[in-house]
Image (cartoon, rainbow, N blue to C red):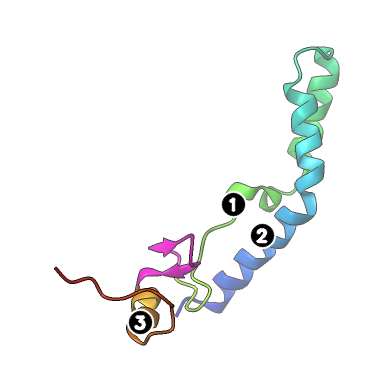
Amino acid sequence: MAKKSAIQRNEKRRRMAKKYDGKRERLKAIANNLELPMEEQFQARLKLAKLPRNSAKGRVQSRCEITGRPRGVYKKFKMSRIALREFASSGNIPGMVKSSW
């Protein structure tokens, strides 16, 4: 089980990324638009830099929904490899069985 503080920190980042998503996209569009004057692009980049760092989507870490483990997480199931194996072995994931050949 991961530390509760790490899980809570990641949840806070997730909320902030969702909150600032629209504003970030608008500022990026202005900053990357080459048809606008350079001064306007520069102002957009300054405003973008003033936003909280944790509001960036790239700072959100994919973690297991069950254990909070940060490594070996399958995006499709939002579970770590270890939790996925336990759930599959106990028959909690429909259609998933141990492979054998």
Mark 1 vs 3, N-terminal side: 1
Q: Quadrant of residue 49?
A: top right
**Image quarter of the N terminus:** bottom left
Whether 33 is drawn above or below 60: the answer is above
Q: Quadrant of residue 70?
A: bottom left
Q: Which residue is mark 2?
A: 13
62 lies left or right of 85: right
Q: x%, y% of residue 62?
A: 52, 60
Q: Which residue is mark 1?
A: 59
Do callouts 1 and 2 mark residues in contact (Cβ within 8 Å)?
yes
Which structural element holds mark 1? Answer: helix
**Image quarter of the C terminus:** bottom left
Extreme bottom residue here?
90
Q: Name the residue type under label 2.
A: Arg
Q: CA distance from mark 1 to mark 2?
A: 7 Å
Q: Which residue is mark 3?
A: 86
User: What residue sits 75% from the left and 47% below the top?
Assistant: 21
User: What residue sits 50% from the left and 78% below the top?
Assistant: 66
Q: Nearer the viewer, residue 44 or 62?
A: 62
Counting other residues with Cα less than 10 Å from the Cα at mark 2, is it few (<14), some (14-19), or many (20 or more)?
many
Q: Name the residue type under label 3.
A: Glu
96 lies left or right of 9: left
Do callouts 1 and 3 mark residues in contact (Cβ within 8 Å)?
no
How many numbered circles are shown? 3
- Residue 71 showing in the rendered view: no
79 within the magenta span: yes
Q: CA distance from mark 1 to mark 3?
A: 29 Å
Mark 1 vs 2, N-terminal side: 2
- Range shown magenta: 70-81
98 lies left or right of 44: left
Extreme left residue here?
101
Q: x%, y% of residue 29?
A: 76, 29
